[in-house]
Amino acid sequence: MTEIASDLPAVVRDLIGKPHYVEQTEFPIEVGYVYNMCAAVEDGNPLYWNPEVARDLAGGQIAPPAMLSAWFKRHHWMPGAGGERKPMQLYFDIKDMVGLPEGIVASNEASFGEPVRIGDVLTTSQYCRALGELKDTKLGRGRFCTMDVVTVNQRNEWCGTDTYNFLIYIKGVR
Amino acid sequence: MSTTRNLTFGEVGEGQELPPLTYPVTATTVVLGAIASRDWRPMHHDRDFAINRNGTKDIFINTPTNAAWFQRFVTDWTGPKGRLGRMKFRMKVPVFPGDTMTLSGRVVRKSVDATGCCWIDLDLAVSVGDRVNTECQARFALPASADDNPWQRHGDRWQP
């Protein structure tokens, strides 16, 4: 459900519920990162290590579902890319627009759809689903904000959604 | 076809505990996970930054690596047919190098959806000593029988 506080300026209200920052992964999904993550947590699941098992169970090699957010992290540096490279740019835009400079993640939930396959090119869209009324909290005066990052593959099949509930606020003001 | 052991839905009961997993965390554990999840933020590899800028006692495991540990923990138990559908986190206290973390879990609910997909809902935790560092609720699909395979569900037949 989309919740929009009544006192928001029209320019902010207009952002809510619409896709923003529609971006593709910077490289096709590659198995080296999958091995790195499996090695990091010593995950010996043959679905990720054994192409024969992967073919039998999942129709080919796939990435662990919980890696979904990794594919949209930008390179630390790229030729021609200037300035700080932030994920979730819509979140920073909204904080600026409503004058609430601080933010914390109150909760995070992810749901996973079609498996991400080696060689896939993924597309992500950022949505603000809800931006609540001003409230006084322990941290300061702020609003609760719900944002989704929705991922689809090159066949436009849904691969997953990351949902973040943020408190955005200004310190000390109550 | 793989002969790997896979848990079926009928073999699991509500209230069942998963076998715990204990792991000694090192700086390498933290950094390997940060790199694999493409998280370049310094609090996951730079001890000086973590202490003096973040105010934590050391570098610490990031959220995607926490998710990967939970995923591995559950599929070690289910076998490779166990398919993650949903995961929700509450990170309370970071996990640092030098900590011995224990992953634990319990089946809180079994259900079958309208498409016939068999689900288990799990309460999971990472603890260090008596303190719970991260809580997680996760939903996994399990095969209904030895012939079933949740990974073959697509589109409307997969509703996590």
Image (cartoon, rainbow, N blue to C red):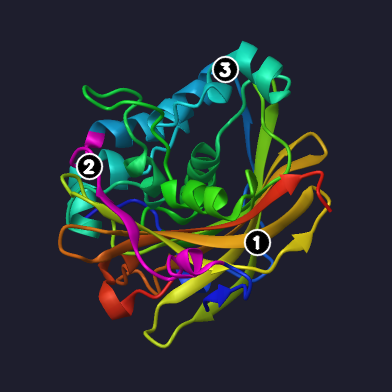
Q: Nearer the viewer, residue A162 or A3?
A: A3
Determine whether B148 is above or below B35 in the image.
below
Which residue is the extreme one toward the bottom? B114
Q: Chain of mark 1?
A: A
Reply yes or no: does residue A18 show up in magenta. Answer: yes
Please rate how many residues cluster around mark 2, counting C-alpha atoms within 10 Å: few if below 14, some from 14 to 19, many from 20. some
| The label number, if any, that marks residue A144 in the structure image | 1
Q: Element under label 2?
A: loop
Q: Name the residue type under label 1.
A: Phe
Please rate how many residues cluster around mark 1, counting C-alpha atoms within 10 Å: few if below 14, some from 14 to 19, many from 20. some
Q: Residue at x 49, y 64 (%)?
A: A12
Q: Name the residue type under label 3.
A: Ala
The span from disc 2 to disc 1 (Cα, nearest Å) is 34 Å
| The label number, if any, that marks residue B27 in the structure image | 3
Which residue is the extreme one toward the top? B48
Q: Residue B46: where, in percent of width, then height?
A: 56, 15
Find the magenta span and give its range. A9-31
Q: Element under label 1?
A: strand
